[in-house]
Amino acid sequence: MTVHTALLQGRRLLEEGGVSAPRLTAEVLLMRATGHDRAWLYAHSTDELIELWWIHFGRYLHERLQGKPTQYITGHQEFYGRDFRVTPDVLIPRPETEHLIEAALAHTNAAGTILDIGTGSGAIAITLALETKARVVAIDVSLAALAVAKENARSLGARVEFVAGDLGTALADSAYDLIVSNPPYVAERDRATLQREVREYEPALALFGGEDGLAVYPRLISDAVRLLRPGGWLMMELGDAVAVREMCAGWSAVEIVNDLAGIPRVLIARKT
């Protein structure tokens, strides 16, 4: 079994299993199995696979065909140009969340202290810590998620203070200039419509925001009122933009930022 043959067989199996991007997925999984990059795979396409590589590759293909996301198999996902470790304890960072980063960076000149509520893998907090000179605090209710976030901060050299707690309940009043959050906003009633990879493998705690997807926002906004300094900013990733905007009726400079597909993605609001 050569490297080239393994890639062809892996691609065919993934195609037959209905997995998206079968060629790329086969490459990524074989890279994981061999410990080599894509350039090596093609430069050594006629090399024989050693038995251990073949065993690992077969297992990874089986896991992917069962619906396990590629990122959980490899343990990695790129976000804002950096490599983050991910496990089934954390949500896989999405490219759409980079819009939240861009919105935050546009307001960090005056942000001495940034708080990331529901940090998960730490992707948002760590990125802001590395892109700015602000003090960054990150909180999550999941101790397993915090362990992943701390590992990411160490590996990427980011200075982030991590706190265990439910939303902002464990934090001091009027201590932050900017609060960012990607809260759970998928409606429970939509669970059956999600891709199997999301529905069965990503943590429900980080996905579902009650029956209508809005359960977390009132608490999050209330905590932000208490935690932000006067004139501070709140930025949240969105599900239902209309409903969440109505919840921020008492705030000033409320703005909705669309993603590249024109979908409302981030709400920005300033504490009056």
Image (tube, grey):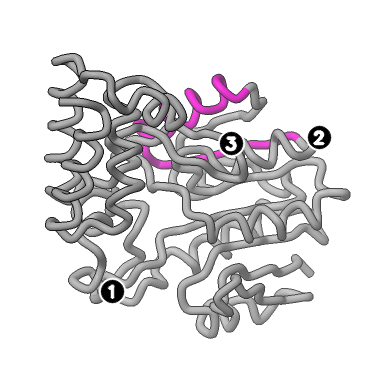
Q: Which residue is label 2 attached to?
A: 133
Task: Tell me the tag on residue 211.
Answer: 1
* Tags 3 and 2 touching, CB below 8 Å: no
**Mark 2 secondary-structure assignment:** loop
Q: Quadrant of residue 254?
A: bottom right
241 falls in the magenta region: no
Residue at 37% of width from left, 71% of height from top? 213
Tell me if mark 1 has few (under 14), some (14-19) or many (20+) residues whose alpha carbon lies within 10 angstroms of its own. Answer: some
**Mark 3 secondary-structure assignment:** strand
Image mark count? 3
**Given the image, on which type of amino acid does mark 1 rest?**
Glu
Q: Position of residue 178 (x, y in %)?
A: 72, 52
Q: Which residues are magenta?
A: 135-156
Q: Which residue is label 3 attached to?
A: 82
Gap in angstroms between the C-alphas marked 3 and 1: 34 Å
> In terms of sequence position, does the residue under pointer 1 or pointer 2 come before the other?
2
> In terms of sequence position, does the residue under pointer 3 or pointer 2 come before the other?
3
